[in-house]
Image (spheres, grey):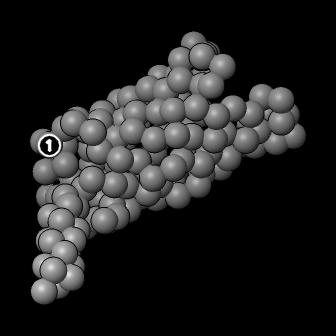
Amino acid sequence: MRRHLLLWLLLAVALAAEPFDRVEVETAKTSIYLGNVSLRMTTLRRDGDQYLGEYDAKVFPFFFSSEKGTLFINCTVQQLEALQRGERVPFTGGGRSTAGDERRVEGHVTPDGPQSTSGKIKVRIFVSRKIQLIFNTTYRFVQ
């Protein structure tokens, strides 16, 4: 009896998870002068009005310019509701490399349609005042 009760409790907790608590962003690549940069993000987890995660940017062939760090994307409930209606939603955010460099993040998300849990995302990372990297990729909400 206890075993069945525990299984039901675990199932109820799993079903109660919000459908927008976690989002996966596919690895993206962009070109730079004489090379390219690939950006990989961990699964982003919702915490209040932000999605938080880690990133790994690999620069080829200038491997010494590669970096890792943490990032956040601001996303309110109103923005999530707009996504559910199929609307394109702009966002802002930021990050910090493991070396302590601050990064400003901007972009927009375009869902595949109303009630969709996936779509396209454009991420713009400001490396300096004059240098910005633009990544186009896809996202999907996961449970």
Mark 1 = which residue?
Answer: 77
Location of residue 33 in the rendering, given as x and y in whole percent from the top left corner: 79, 33
The residue lying furthest to the top in this view is: 129
Q: Quadrant of residue 111?
A: bottom left
Residue type at mark 1? Val
105 relative to 26, above or below: above
Locate the C terminus and report the quarter of the image it occupies.
bottom left
Q: Quadrant of residue 93?
A: top left
The residue lying furthest to the front in this view is: 2
101 relative to 29, above or below: above
67 relative to 84, above or below: above
- What residue do we see at 66% from left, 19% from top? 99
SS for callout 1: helix
| One can see residue 128 in this view | yes
> Are there few (<14), some (14-19), or many (20+) residues within 10 Å of tag 1?
few
Side of 70 relative to 131 (left or right): left
Locate the N terminus and report the quarter of the image it occupies.
bottom left
| One can see residue 86 in this view | no
Location of residue 28 in the rendering, given as x and y in whole percent from the top left corner: 59, 52
- What residue do we see at 19% from left, 58% from top? 18
Side of 121 relative to 76 (left or right): right
* Nearer the observer, 41 or 115: 41
Q: Quadrant of residue 97?
A: top right
Side of 56 relative to 82 (left or right): right
Location of residue 31 in the rendering, given as x and y in whole percent from the top left corner: 71, 42
- What residue do we see at 64% from left, 34% from top? 68
